[in-house]
Image (spheres, coloured by chain):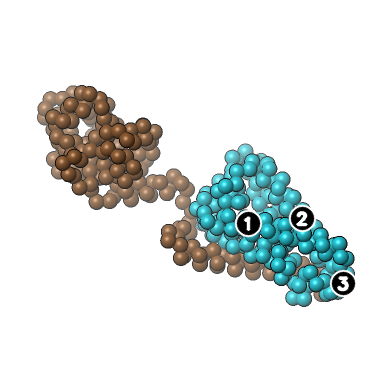
Chain colours: A brown, B cyan
Amino acid sequence: MNTRSSVVGDFLYVIVLAFGSLLIGLGINRFRSTPLPLVYQSPEQRLSAELAHLVAAPPMQLNGSDSIGFNKFRTIFQSGSALIVDARDKTFYDQGHIPGALSLPRDDFPSSYKALRPTLDQHRDQPIVVYCSGGDCHDSRLVAGALLSLGYSQVQVFTDGWQGWTDNGMPEAH
Amino acid sequence: MKLYNRIIVWIMSVAVGGLFIYAGWAKSFGPQAFADSIASFKILPAGLIVPAALSIPPFEILAGLLAVTGWHRRVGLLAIAVATAAYCVAIGSALVRGLDVNCGCFGPVSNLRPGTELLRDLLVLAFCVASYVLALSGLSSSAGSDLLDSSSSS
C-alpha cells in the first residue's frame, strides 16, 4: 500500500465518520425531550414563535382580583400607579386611547412586545392594567394571560375597556 | 517508525484527541446554543446549520476516541485535522468580515476572543498534521510494522 492510497483511504474513512456522526446526531435529537427543528430559527424567530403561541393560548380566566371596573381604574389612572396597556388593534389605538397607555395589540403581539419589552420589564413586579374595546372583547384577557406567562406578576384587566372609558367622558389621547 | 517518533505521535494524538473528546462532550449538552454559534458565522444556509450542530459533537468525540485509543489513529488524526482546518477557515473569515462571533468550541463556557481561538486551532492543526505525517511515514518506512497505528493494517 503506497502513501497516496493510504491518504485516500483515510479520507474515505473520515467521510464515513462524518456521515455516521450525522446519523448519530439526528438520532439523539429525535429522542430529546424538545428536539431541535431541522431548519434553523434565529433567537428572534424563536421568541416571536413563542410569543405568538402564548397570545394564542386560551384567554385568561378572570377572578375578582384580576379584573377591575371603571371606578377602581379611574383611581389607578389618576394616581399613575400602574402601567396601562391597550390591547386593541393599532388602528383603533391611533384613533384614540387612554392617555399614557402603551399599544400592545393582540394581533401584533410578538413584534410589539419586543419593542416595548424594556419599558414592560421595568414594571415586571408592578401593576399593569390591560384593556381592549370593552364588553365581551377578548384581546385584553389574551394579552394579560401572555404577560402573566412571561413573568409579569401583577397584571389586571380593565373590563369596561375603551367603551366604558369614553362613556364616562374621560380624557382621550390621539 | 523510530521509538521517539512513536512517542511523539502518541503524546500529540492523546493531547488533540482528548481536546476533541472534551470539546464534543461540552457541545453535546447545548445543541441550540451551538447552532446559534454556527449561525453567527453567517457561512452556512439555515438548512445546514442544525444538521451541522447535531453532527459535529459526535464527530469530534469519535475522532478523538480514534486518536486516543490508537484504533485507526491516522483516521482520527486526519478527521481532527480536517475539522480544525474548517474551524480555522470559519474563524478567519469571521475576523476578516469583522463579525463578533463566539465559536462555541467548548460549549457555552468558551469565551475566548476569535483571534485567540484561531491561534489555538492553528496550533491543533499543526499538531495533527505533524502527527499524521509521522504516522504515515512510519507506515511507509516500516512496511506495516507500526504497532502504534493499527489502521495501517486496514
Is the C-beta separation of discs 3 and 2 under 8 Å?
Answer: no
Could you tell me residue B131's position as x and y percent? 79, 60
Q: Amino acid at mark 1?
A: Tyr
Residue nearest the observer in this picture, B131 or A3? B131
Residue nearest the observer in this picture, B43 or A121? A121
Q: Chain of mark 2?
A: B
Residue nearest the observer in this picture, A142 or B99? A142
Q: Does residue A75 appear anywhere in the picture?
A: yes
Going by the image, does A142 lie left or right of A136? Answer: right
Could you tell me residue B44's position as x and y percent? 57, 52
Within-10-Å neighbours for mark 3: few <14, some 14–19, many 20+: few
What mark, if any, has residue B127 been given in the picture? 2
Could you tell me residue B36's position as x and y percent? 52, 49
Going by the image, does B24 lie left or right of A121? Answer: right
Residue bearing mark 1: B22
Above or below B45: residue B6: below
Q: Secondary structure at mark 1?
A: helix
Q: Amino acid at mark 3?
A: Ser
Going by the image, does B17 lie left or right of B137? Answer: left
Please tell me which residue is depicted at 18% across the width and 30% down the height of the picture: A73
Q: Nearer the viewer, mark 2 or mark 1?
A: 1
Going by the image, does A39 lie left or right of A149? Answer: right
Residue bearing mark 3: B142
Q: CA distance from mark 3 to mark 2?
A: 22 Å
